[in-house]
Amino acid sequence: MAKSRNTSYSIGVDFGTNSVRALVVDTATGAELASAVFNYPSGRDGILLDRRDPNLARQNPADYIQGLFASVAAALRAARKRRGFDPARVVGIGVDTTGSTPLPVDRRGVPLASDPRFRRHLAAQAWLWKDHTAHAEAAEITDAARAAGVPYLAKCGGTYSSEWFWSKILHCCRAAPDVFSAAYSWLECCDFVPAYLTGSTDPLTCPRSVCAAGHKAMYNAAWRGLPSKDFLARLSPDLADLRDRLYRKAVPSDRPAGRLSPDAAKKLGLPAGIAVAVGGFDAHFGAVGSGIRPGTLVKILGTSTCDMMVWPLDRPLADVPGVCGIVPGSIVPGMYGLEAGQSAVGDIFNWFVSHLAPPEFARGDRHAGLARAAARLHPGESGLLALDWNNGNRTILVDPLLTGLLLGQTLHTTAPEIYRALIEATAFGALTIINRFEEHDVQVREIVNCGGIAEKSPLLMQIYADALNRPMKVSRSAQSCALGAALFGAVAGGAWPTTEEAQARMTAVRDKVYRPNPAAAKVYDELYTLYRALHDAFGTALYNGKLNRVMKDLLAIRDRVRKGAAH
Amino acid sequence: MAKSRNTSYSIGVDFGTNSVRALVVDTATGAELASAVFNYPSGRDGILLDRRDPNLARQNPADYIQGLFASVAAALRAARKRRGFDPARVVGIGVDTTGSTPLPVDRRGVPLASDPRFRRHLAAQAWLWKDHTAHAEAAEITDAARAAGVPYLAKCGGTYSSEWFWSKILHCCRAAPDVFSAAYSWLECCDFVPAYLTGSTDPLTCPRSVCAAGHKAMYNAAWRGLPSKDFLARLSPDLADLRDRLYRKAVPSDRPAGRLSPDAAKKLGLPAGIAVAVGGFDAHFGAVGSGIRPGTLVKILGTSTCDMMVWPLDRPLADVPGVCGIVPGSIVPGMYGLEAGQSAVGDIFNWFVSHLAPPEFARGDRHAGLARAAARLHPGESGLLALDWNNGNRTILVDPLLTGLLLGQTLHTTAPEIYRALIEATAFGALTIINRFEEHDVQVREIVNCGGIAEKSPLLMQIYADALNRPMKVSRSAQSCALGAALFGAVAGGAWPTTEEAQARMTAVRDKVYRPNPAAAKVYDELYTLYRALHDAFGTALYNGKLNRVMKDLLAIRDRVRKGAAH
């Protein structure tokens, strides 16, 4: 079928943890013409690590620029092979990134890491979402907000996280004052890329995403933007000063951040002046690309997960303790966006197969062999139970100083049994989040999954259906985040008047639905009671704090010993 | 040096879990002339298993006889190559076995497993010490003894174990009534072998070891032998009837069980009529072979451990809760023998290397590679903590329905870190036993280690020295159990008048002592506090039984699911 004269395209660029993906989409149908992936070249799998501090995870901002051009160029090359595609008909670009991933910039908005003085300085790089070096500052911010009686934490679950904007910047201020002083301002990665594409990188004027601002920087229109200068001054006078060099207003992603600059347009082979949408976070865009709407929970299943919901602005909505954020316009403009999530899911399975898969499962795809053997097991038959906290707990405990737990091992316990127990642990973590939503009257009527694991692991999807005792749907797109970015590119570029109308035409779920098996669901119901016993014992002050000190004390001993050993 | 005319020898035969070892010893010095090992041919590594029930562990009694002749013959062949050795100068044989390992026998003392009707019946075999099928009966016996107000449990830690004599027989009575009815009596393995060697197998008259009787069958002179018929009738009338076909008096191992029968002497190539000592358990004999005396704790470190102490009969001694047994004459005749232990130590490391060692550690001796990497770690640096309960907890909780626990995993945790954490867990388990002894005024002034792990793992020995903050000595003999058996053979054969005199000449410790490193001991002191928090949470009713139900509930679900899946 020949393309109509009105056919238009948009491009979504999705900056993930290890790579960036560009996707070319037909704005009328969401049909995906072509995509390309570029792996970040720096560090290990694109992440800069520090052997002495396992909490540290940074990225080289130069990788973002290199990956932006390489992935978009490759996707356009591939799209040109499709009949009827014409890059002149691309009407907009959307960009999503990980977050909170702030980077220090100079007065012109150029990353400090480009400055030869700071090139090798880890604090001058982008502070990747999963960097937990700022856990002390996060606790300090939480304490300060509680002590000051300010409402800033009400919309982010009551506890500020070490993964977020202010914790990281405050930690930089203390741990790397040279970098902090040299930085004129800080940009979230999702604001940096659109600013770069539009050529308007001035930190004082470049548009800032309400998604990043509202979920990670305690921005809210109710208290007129960022936290007050007075409050920030309690943490550090330098932080209060920085507030003047950040922003007053943040905007949703259906708006253009600006127009593609002639320079970037030339490099990309796209029309100059097309819309570049305001950026946002991958999970939020993934939710949009999976067709999120009120009552639908979208799970973005990857190395970690995000569990996203939306809620009409005109319906009453309680603050949900432990849920990372409730922000107007952060997912679908005109609705509250609710974000929860698990700090590690795929990362736990990857850890297990890399470190503990015995030789018989170590050939080829280690996941495939273990998953095959694990699929033959019945729920409960291993006697194992695990906590999914190898990277802390984001929701509902909001505590990075928690660690993994495996219980029930005998002298016969096998690797596939443990692999399955780890999947089940993440299912129980997912259920805990859903229960928390529903305890606060946010009903979950449908679950749509997207992301790599939803694609690749029927075992996990079936375990989730059984353990959550709900049908598990899967987003039609295998790259929902990039599709969400392309969708916002289309809206910002004028192809659709609203995000909802674009979603109705550009997104869908697959026919294949994973349905719960009642017998399995019954066993998992029993196991979940035991999971909650462990969860509450080690994650809350339930037993007078006797048990929830254990993981923290071990981490404190570990850090002390490692510091001592390094001398 | 030519042997004096008075040189004499004795033979120790040590029946372990997977093999039997025979050792030829010079009675004057304890010098070991030759030894030989025979692996039991039946089942997996000599153990008969049941795929449907991981609690089951049995052995084929025919393996004992075959192994007895094969190992002694091979050891004698090797000894004959030594200048001056003459089998005619062997004065006695001692026998130790695992226990409680009871086997059903007919009226003549022939194992029921030899009867073609029962050859393949698992209940007709020897019930190996680590068989936990009788956990319900163990709990029932404990409850009955408490309800009846009888003192039978005072000398075995207050809780009767599923590993012990009456639990197993009661379970057989219920689960395999055909076997129970066909059995005229039951013999401990350590009574069966001497009876067989002396040709006096009549169950009503063959000598019974006080070591087995006192530690496993609630035998005590204070209540005139075995538990009363009335008490046994509360459990089952059949058990009360059986009492008449067991024994009234049990004897220590410095006494001869009888004389080597002409038939056995001929088969073995030894003088007929030499003494065969009353049998005993491997751990007790290992303690004797390691030079146990008041104040010395002997640790027999193998797949499981036994922690043995002796105490003069004329000094006051409290009942020690959770310590498996306090029995006059069970180790050194004329002293109390105290037995404690851990249900799995080497078995846990073996489990880990068989099931979870990644390929880089799977070549050659998996223990060696992991131990090398683990030895490079500092105490506390992994952030890990484990419970050593993969096979339940023998001392101080006396609870087979406990399972392993590993806590503190991150996304960076490595196999050597876990391997070390498992070693440390067993060290903390060992420390818990020592603390329990000392809380009841049984002071531990010296620790002597023996057994395979004491020989092979300098890493474990150093971790134990650090975690227990005490010097770790090692028995001179690499086969202390067999040496203890030979020592009793020497005493029963008249080479020495008393066990203590024989010990003074035939046993010693090595020059190499593992001494605690103060810095490491300090970290382990902190870690032990956390270990105790987990130990008490999961092993006692501390938190209203909320957490100590978790492992038991998981096992109940496991067993139910496996039974369901088998149909």
Image: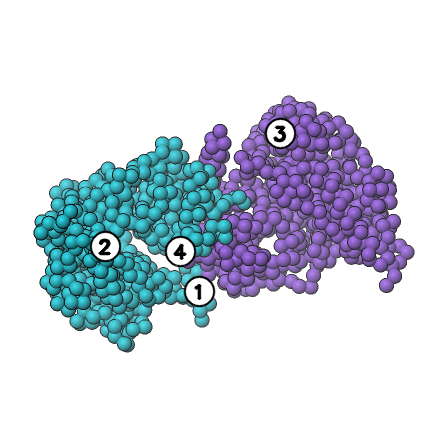
Chain colours: A cyan, B purple
Disc 2 to disc 3, how far (Cα)? 69 Å
Disc 2 to disc 1, how far (Cα)? 47 Å
Seen in the image, is A173 located left or right of residue A332? right
Q: Earlier in the sequence, mark 2 or mark 1?
A: 2
Q: Position of residue A136 (x, y in %)?
A: 32, 60
Q: How many marks?
A: 4
Residue type at tag 4: Leu
Label 1, residues with CA under 10 Å away: few <14, some 14-19, many ≥20: some
**Both labels 4 and 1 in a single chain:** no
Residue type at tag 3: Cys
For the residue pair A535 and B65, the one nearer the viewer reads as B65
In the rendered image, which residue does mark 2 sit on? Answer: A34
In the rendered image, which residue does mark 1 sit on? Answer: A562
Seen in the image, is B536 located left or right of residue A495? right
> Image quadrant of residue B445?
bottom right
Residue under mark 4: which chain is it in? B
Q: Residue furthest bottom?
A: A117
